[in-house]
Image (cartoon, rainbow, N blue to C red):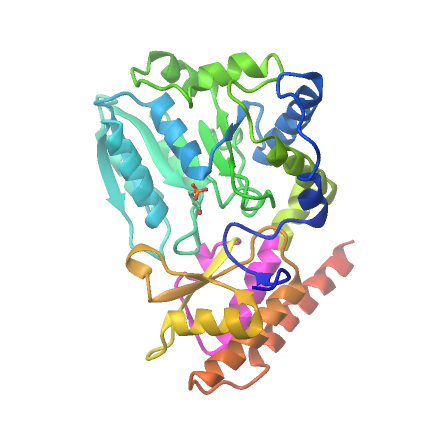
Amino acid sequence: MREDQIFLLPGPTPVPPQSLRSMSSPMINHRGPAFKEILEEVTPQIQKIMETKNDVFILTASGTGGMEAAVANFTSPGDKVLVASIGSFGERFKKICERYGTVVDFIDFPWGTAIDPEVIREKLNKDKKREIKAIFLQHNETSTGVINDLKAVSEARGEHPALLIVDAVSGLAAGELKTDAWNLDVVISGSQKAFMIPPGLAMISVSQRAWEVAQKSTNPVFYFDLKQYKEFLSKGQTPWTPAISLFYALKESLQLMLEEGLDNILKRHRLHRDMVRAGVKAIGLELLASDEVASPAVTAVIAPEGIQVNAIRSLMQNKYNVALAGGQGKLKNKIFRIGHLGYVKPTDIFAALASLELVLTELGLKVDLGVGVRAAQRVLLERSGENAHTS
Ligand code: PLP
C-alpha cells in the first residue's frame, strides 16, 4: 500500500505532517516538568474545543475506553438508564451499560434517522419518581452518518435530573457542540477523529452534577477512576503512564485547530459534507441520511442495486489508492462510507469522486463521467463566493 493514499475513513483520519513528526521526539518523564507543561497546555485547549469550563481529562484509551469510563464512573449497578440509539455506537453504549449492571431502556431509532427529542421528553415526563439516572447518546453516529440535535435533547430533558452523557468521539470539532450552554454533563471524544492524531487518547469532560453522582457510584473502577485523574491533574500528571508520543501530536494538532478557529473548522466540515453529498447525488447514488440530519463527519452511501460494497471499496483502494469505509452492523454490505473528517481537503474529495465515477463505470453502472466532481466543484465555488462576500 502506498503511503500517500487518499484516506477518507471516519477514523482514523489523516494526520498532519507536523503532528506525525512530533511523535518521533524522544521520551520524557511523565512525572516531570516537560510533560506537566504539555498537559497543562492541551487540557484548557480541549476545554475550548468542547466549549466548557468543566473538568476535562485525557485518558490513554481508545474512544470506547472513554465510553466505558463514563458508564463506570457515573452509574451504579441497578440504576435505570436510557440509551437513545441511532446506530452501531448506540448499541455499544447499551452493551457497556448492561455489562455494568444498569437497567437499560433502549430506544432504538431507525438507522439513518436522528433521535426524536419528543420521545425522550415523553419518557422523562412519565418518570415521576425520577428513577432514570442517565441518558446515553451519540453526538454523531459514525455508522450511519447522522448527527443528533443535542441542544433539542437537552431541552427535552428540562428539569429532569438524569445526567446527559454524550459520545462525541466522531462529532466533536466536526459538528457544533456546546457543552456548557447545552448542559451536557459528560462529553467523550477520541484522538483519531477531528483531533487529527492517531488512535489512543480519549477525552472526557465532567460536570459538577456528574461529579456528585461519581462520589456515590458503587462500581469497582480502577484504571478509569476519574477521581484519580482529577487528583493527578492538579499536579500536572495523569495517574498512569500516558501515551506520551500521542500527547506530542495532540499539542501540534490543537495548535493547528486553534489557529484555524472552531467556527472555521465547523464551516470546513459543513463544506466537505456538502461537497460529498452533492457529488454522490449527482452520480446518481442514494444517501442513507436526509440533508436535515446529515453528518458533517461522514457520509453513508447506499450501494447501487447489484453492485457489491466490497467490489467498490477494493477497486477504490487497489486501483485509485482511495480508502473508504464499509457498513457496520446491519448496514454491512449495504452501504459504504466516505469520511470527510479532520485533515481532509477539497482536492481529496475531488479525487475520491472522480475515482468513484470510474469504479462504478467499471462495475457496470452508467455514469456521466465528471458529473460528481462538477457538482462538488460548484458547492466549493459557491461557498468561496460566500466567504469572499462576508470577509
Ligand atoms: N463512538 C463513536 C461515535 C465512534 O465513531 C467510535 C469509533 O469509531 C467510537 C465510539 C469508538 O471509538 P474507538 O474505536 O476509538 O474505541
Farthest residue, direction front: 26
Residue 24 relative to residue 270: left or right: right
Asked whether 22 or 256 is in front, the reply is 22
- Residue 387 lies, in percent from the top left, at 73, 58
Asked whether 77 or 47 is in front, the reply is 77
Instruction: Quadrant for residue 102, please give it.
Output: top left
Which residue sits at x=61%, y=48%? 266
Instruction: Quadrant for residue 29, please give it.
Output: top right
- Residue 175 lies, in percent from the top left, at 54, 47
Residue 22 in magenta? no
In the rendered image, the vertical position of residue 75 relative to residue 253, given as above or below: above
Q: How many marks?
A: 0
Residue 294 in magenta? yes
Residue 155 relative to residue 52: left or right: left
Which residue sits at x=58%, y=66%? 275
In the rendered image, the vertical position of residue 53 relative to residue 354, given as above or below: above
Question: Can the viewer see residue 158?
Answer: no
- Residue 271 lies, in percent from the top left, at 61, 59
Magenta: predominant secondary structure element?
A: helix
- Residue 330 lies, in percent from the top left, at 28, 58
Instruction: Quadrant for residue 245, please give it.
Output: top right
- Ligand 1 image-quadrant field: top left
Which residue sits at x=30%, y=19%? 219
Query: Dividing the image into 4 quarters, which one contains the N terminus?
Result: bottom right
In magenta, the rendered stretch is: 269-296
Which residue sits at x=28%, y=38%? 94
Residue 205 relative to residue 137: left or right: right
Question: Can the viewer see residue 391?
Answer: yes
